[in-house]
Structures are given as C-alpha cells and as structure tokens.
Image (spheres, rainbow, N blue to C red):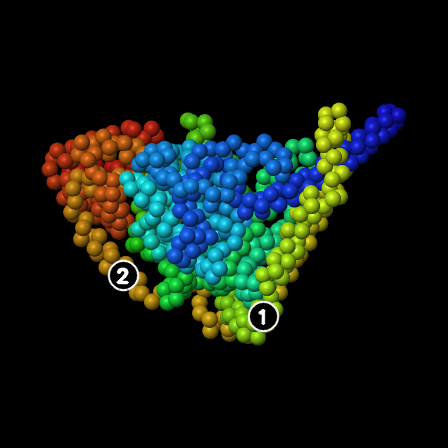
Amino acid sequence: MFTAATHRLMTDYSEYWTDAAQRAVLFTDILRKRGNTYLEHLEKDQPPVLVFDYEMVLDGRRFDRPANYALVGILDRRIESSGGAGESQPQASDNPPERRHRSCVAAKAPKAASRPIVIFDPRAGHGPGIGGSKTDSQIGMALDAGHPVYFLIFFTRPERGQTLADVRNAQIRFIEMVRELHPEAPRPAIIGNCQGGWAAALVGAERPDLVGPMVFNGSPLSYWGGVEGANPMRYTGGLLGGVWINSLLSDLGNGYFDGANLVANFEHLNPANSLWSKLYNVYAHVDTEEKRFLDFERWWGGFFLMTDKEIHQIVDGLFVGNKLERGEFELDAGRRVDLKNNHNPVVVFASFGDNITPPQQAFNWIVKTYGTIEEIKRRGQVIVFISHSNIGHLGIFVSAKIARKEHKEIIASFDMLDYLPPGLYQMQIEADPDEPGEYGITYAEKHTDDILALDDGLEDEKAFLAVRKVSEATDTLYRAFVSPWIRMANTDATAEALRQMHPQRVQRYVFSDLNPWMIPVKTWAAQIKEKPNRRPAAENNLFSAWEAFWSQSIVDGMNLYRDIRDAACESMFKAMYENPWMNMVSEFAGTVVPDNDQDLEEVHRRDAERWRENMATGEFADAMVRIFLVIGFADQMVQRKGYQTIGRLFAKSPRIEDLELYKMQQRVREQSRIVQTDTEKSIATLPRLLAKRHDREDALAMIQNAVESLGRELEPQEQAALQRVREVLVA
C-alpha cells in the first residue's frame, strides 16, 4: 500500500513538472502572439474585429464637420479564424474600411421591406466590432431574422477639434442614409452597446423622426445610481476631485485622451481577474484556450483616442455631472438634450452581474426623466426593461448564449413594440415547452416603484451634487493655473512617447517578436506542440489539484483586497462628501430628482378629459382594438404569441385587412390611452362604436375566434373582462 502510494506520488510529481514547464513555454508563446497581434492590428490602423464582411457606405471623415466615424453595411457571414492569431492569418477586417468602395447595401438586403438595424458600438477606450465579433452575436441574430444590418465603426484617432456634437450629427447623417437606402421599410431600429447606448439616446432625442425602436444594452444613463457596498466605480470621480484629472491626461496627450486609461480603469475594478485569473486560465488550459484568448485580446488591446473636448464633455456632463437624465446636458450651446423628445419604443437591457453599468445606472433614468408612470403613458412612450441575474458587462455584448436568447428575442420583438400600449414593461423570456430551442415572451406591466426597488434609495446620490460642484471648481483652477504650462511644454512627440510607455501597451509589445528573447520561445513552443513531445498531466494529477488550489487561494486573496479597498474608498467618499459642510454644498447645488416646472397634475387631468371625450367615437377597427386591449391586458401581462394571434386575425378580417400599418399603430395608441384612462367607461361605450347589429355579431365572432386560437385557457382577470365585454355587446 505504501509502495503504491509512493509510486503514485513520484509519478504525479514527474508528470506535473514536465507539464508545468511545457505550459510555461506555451503560455509565454501565446503572450508573444498577443504582442504580435497587437502590432499587426496597429499596422492595419486597428480595423473592426468583426467576423462579418462589410462595405463602406458613408465616411464621416469627409463631412464638412468631420468625425472619425463611418457607416458600413454588413454583407455576409465570414468564417472565424481557426487559431494561431498573431501569425498574420487573414481576418474579416483585414482591409481597412477607408480602402473599400462605397456600395449600395440596399441591393444586398435580405428583404426590401425588412426593418434595417443599425448597431452603435461603444467607443470607450477600445475599438469597434464587439457587437459582431462572433457568428452568434447581435449582427448574427439580426441577419438570421432577415434584417439588413448596418454598423457604426470609428477610427483610432479622432479629427482635430472633434466634439460630441460633431459625432452626433455624423450619426444622424448615417441614419438618414439608411432611410434613403430602405425607403419602403419601417424606420431603422438602433442597438446601442454600453457607451453606444447613450450615444444612440442623443440621436433619438435630437431626431426621433428618423429612428424606430431603440435598445440600450448595458448603457449608463443614470450615472450616480448604485447600491452602497456594491458599486464602487461611481465614487471614483469624487475621490479624484472630478474632471480635472481627465483635463490633465488630455494635456499630456497634446489634445488627445488615451483610451488605454479607460481600459486600465476597467481592469482596476477586478484585480483578481486582470492580474491573475484571465492569464492563469490560459496557462492552465494552454492547449485549448489560445484562440479564444487571442481573439478577445485583439479587441481588448486596441486602444483608441478621444479629443480633449470629447472626454471633458463626457466626464463633466455625464459621469460626474449626470446632466443627461436631468435634462441639463448640452451638446450645442444653449440647447439642452431632453430624453423625453424620443417617442419611439425603448428597450433597456442590464445585468446584476455588471460591475461597470449596474442595473441602477441603466434603469434609474426612467424614473428621474419621466417622474411617474402616468407621464410615460401620457407621452405615448413604451419602455421595456430586461435584466439578467449574473452575466458580466462584456458578456452582455460578447456572450453567444446571451445573443441566442436575449438579443435574438429583443430583435424579434421590434415590430411588436409599436403595438404595445404606452407604459413601462418588464420583458420576461422563458423556454417554450412546445418548441425546443424557442422562447415564450411575456411583457409584464410595471410601475416606477419596481425600478426604485432595485436601488437602496436615492438619498445617497445627494452627495454627488457636491462632487459636481467640487469638480467644476478644481477643473477651473487646473485650467487657469496648470494647464497652460503643460500645453506649452508638450509636443506631439512627447505625447506619443507617453502613450507608448503606458503599461497597457508595454505589456503587449515587450512579449512580441520585437523582443529578441522571444526567438527561442517560438522555437521551443513549436517543438513542444508536436504530439510525441507534448505531455500534459492527467486530470487526476495530485499536483495539478494542488496548483488549482493555490490559484484559487490567490484569487480569494485578491478579492479580499478588492473588497477592503472598495469599502475604504466608499468610506472615504462618504467622509469627504457627506459631512455637514459638503451637505450645505449639496443643498445649494439642487435636488437629486430635478424639479419639473410644469404642473403635471393639471396636464394629466386635461389629457384624461381629452380621452374621455373620444371614447364614444370610432369605427369597427377601433372597437376591436379596444376590446382586445381590455381583455389582453386585464392581468397586466401580455404574451407575444397572443399578440401575433390577434395580428393574424386582423390581417384576415375583411373589415380590417386593408388598414394601413401606420394607421393601425395609431389606433392602438389611441385606444390604449382610452382604456388606460377609464377601463369601465371604455367598455360601456363600445355599443356606440358598434351601433349596428351585424357589427356586434362580427365583433363577437372575432372575439370567439381569437379565444379559440390562443391555445391556452384565459386567466381569471381576462375571463372576467371577456364576460363584461360580451354582456355589453349582447345587451
């Protein structure tokens, strides 16, 4: 027994150290390939990391007010590279966009009348393409659904003097071009990822007539939101003294802000993953993780620049100032951006596992911008929110699993959103028991209290009012007394030298082929990979288990450090900004929820009177829409299948089939407001709309047909509403 155990121990020992040494060489070689990938990507001017082919449609750098953005049309699928990244293998984006010719993507669209989809990728340090970096992605799901797909890309260096207004105006021109290419299709749906979400919101607020449904994925629009003890990133601006630090970094960049700083901030949030887990996972699974790691690092290591004006407006107006949800944000001098201007349906997707944009920052703007559910309804606005329990920030855009479920179903719901009654809904996605691989979609009506329930209250945001004032003061002092000296001493050469010395860049090119010490690593790795030479340890190797144990111990230790650090930062923030002196500053600075100058109670009263006056007027189509709204929303929930069933019945009805699409949408909005204003009176006045006997008979027959076609039993509330409608029509 002792001999067998000793033999096992010695065998595992020898096997483990052979494997560990080989993995060390292969891991170092992967880092070498990462460095080469970084350099090759730079040489090609960092094209999008899309795995789909595309063509240039419109280049924003050629506008009268240029911006470093371009609109491209997705043509077809491209096969993902099969490994060995960093060894000059072809990619979907090998040809820089500026070298492609402009083409009419409309000619390649799957269906002429399909709604086009435009994707806004985030410009937050990294380059474009994350929304289409895999076959199963937002682009892939949209193509599978038959939509023409467009993508907004951007280039490494912005135009000199470029502002956020220039970017927004360029994006508006891109959407106008999409409308020109698809004149017969519904207005394009806009999908905004992270920073692309608030960028899309700016477009929707400025030109709501151009866009259709809008999706904000992991997008911060309520920058002060969060839960105490869980979301430390929101305290960073206050602890650093505000926007002045970004002004300093922009001055050191000679008018440009380095996106590598933003990437470093992201990694700073989770040091265990950045410093250990991500790399150890590659080391531990060196035979299988190479391609995934290098594909991701091509995007993660692509650092893009912003102008000093852009980053200052972003940090001062959004992240520190939180002016967008408050209606105080200005892109053009004297013109405030009002999110309420956008009357198109909005879908907001966030995750409780997201430590960069937690649900509070993604959802709270709904409450602060509109105030009450009554105001959302009065404005005819449809807002749908959807949450995930644990996926991380990048997973919202990158995960193939999320794409095949959430993004697929969001895209499939675009046309239905125009027919939902105004209000706030939660989109619930559940597996369909009748169709494996498919999902049943339910929209549950919610109230603003349901959004606030995700937070621990808004009172803790009061301190950020003081942060905003401190930020304005420190930035003013910096710009007056420090900035001129730095600008005078700095040049393009010194700025570029500082960028190249950034740790995010150094860690890449120091392991590349620029380093002669990597030459033997490449040779050794090639020899080890040959089958007779590669000797991985067995899965049940005792020393491999010991290695995994110590790795997890390192992770636990780093997580403990992170938790202590975050708790200390939160305590320091509270000590700095929640003391009596700063409370006085906060009181002077305003309120967390901005005051509305309008007397909304009177506005809502007049609005209700208007809809009550219209209850007794209408035609057969109005009556049927009202009836199905009364029944379908009796339990404050509606299933997509039920809506689709009613839509098919309407399409087959000789009395409704000829109704134009926009007129039907208008009727749904009008009848929805009538039902929401006074449900009982809306039912009682149905005989006025169905004055003739054959009208009522046709209506009752259509109702019966709908009930039989649903394929399920009605809920008690739906059954009661149906019975009430029948009583009124047969009386």
Other residues around mark 2 within 10 Å, as few (<14) / some (14–19) / many (≥20): few
Are the residues at dot 2 and dot 1 in contact (C-beta closer than 8 Å)?
A: no
Which image quarter is the N terminus in? top right
Residue 661's image quarter?
top left
> Residue at image x 51%, y 40%?
95
Q: Is residue 47 visible?
A: yes
Other residues around mark 1 within 10 Å, as few (<14) / some (14–19) / many (≥20): few
Amino acid identity at mark 1: Met
Residue 186's image quarter?
top left
- Whether 351 is drawn above or below 314: the answer is above
On the image, numbered disc 2 is attached to which residue?
603
Q: Secondary structure at mark 2?
A: helix
> Residue at image x 52%, y 44%?
47
Which image quarter is the C terminus in? top left
Residue 659's image quarter?
top left
- Whether 681 is drawn above or below 459: the answer is above
Separation (CA) of disc 2 from disc 1 = 56 Å
User: Which of the two labelled residues, at mark 2 and mark 1, occupies the earlier sequence position?
Assistant: 1
